[in-house]
Image (cartoon, rainbow, N blue to C red):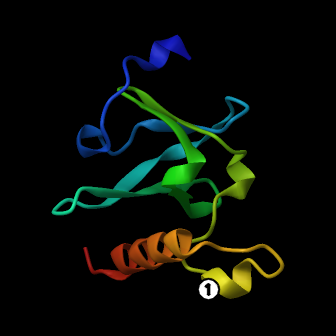
Amino acid sequence: MEALGEPLAYTVLPDGVPVYDSNEVLVGEVEHVLADEGPDIFHGLIVDTPDGHRFADREQIAQLRRRGVILAVPGTDLRDPHADPIAAEAGRPVSEQVQHGLRRAWEWMSQPR
């Protein structure tokens, strides 16, 4: 994945760059970077996929690069930001960090544009 260019910070990651999963399969593209810029907290990414928007928590992201993102997980592990994080993950623990990120994703997606 050298063709993706040099690593970069979430603060300058452009929308629209491709997102690849841990198997280097194209999952979709970056729709939006979720962060609290004041305290400099990166929550994750909203990824536009053929199956709709998905949330990639910061711990699910291996690399942010100029021309693409590489996930640390298969694309099927990304969560639907519209789903209830507790109900959607029955039997699979959801950390407080992931719940917060999913709430932020849902809030961003429900804002009028």
Looking at the rendered structure, the secondary structure element under dot 1 is loop
- Horizontal and vertical percent position of residue 40: 24, 56
Question: Circle 1: is it few (<14), some (14-19), or many (20+) Cα within 10 Å?
Answer: some
Does residue 41 lie above or below 67 as drawn?
below
Residue highlighted by disc 1: 84
Does residue 9 lie above or below 102 as drawn?
above
Residue sitting nearer the eye, 96 or 106: 96
Extreme top residue here?
2
- Horizontal and vertical percent position of residue 91: 84, 78
To which quarter of the image does residue 45 belong?
bottom left
> What amino acid does circle 1 point to?
Asp
| Labels in figure, total | 1
Does residue 46 lie above or below 4 as drawn?
below
- Horizontal relation, residue 15 to residue 2: left or right: left
Placement of the N terminus among the 4 image quadrants:
top right
Q: What's the residue at 62%, 80% (across, down)?
A: 85
- Horizontal relation, residue 91 to residue 62: left or right: right
- Horizontal relation, residue 86 to residue 57: left or right: right
Placement of the C terminus among the 4 image quadrants:
bottom left
- Horizontal and vertical percent position of residue 25: 69, 33
Extreme right residue here?
91
Q: What's the residue at 50%, 70% (across, down)?
A: 97
Residue sitting nearer the eye, 103 or 28: 103
Q: What's the residue at 44%, 56% (across, down)?
A: 44
Q: What's the residue at 44%, 78% (across, down)?
A: 106
- Horizontal and vertical percent position of residue 39: 21, 62
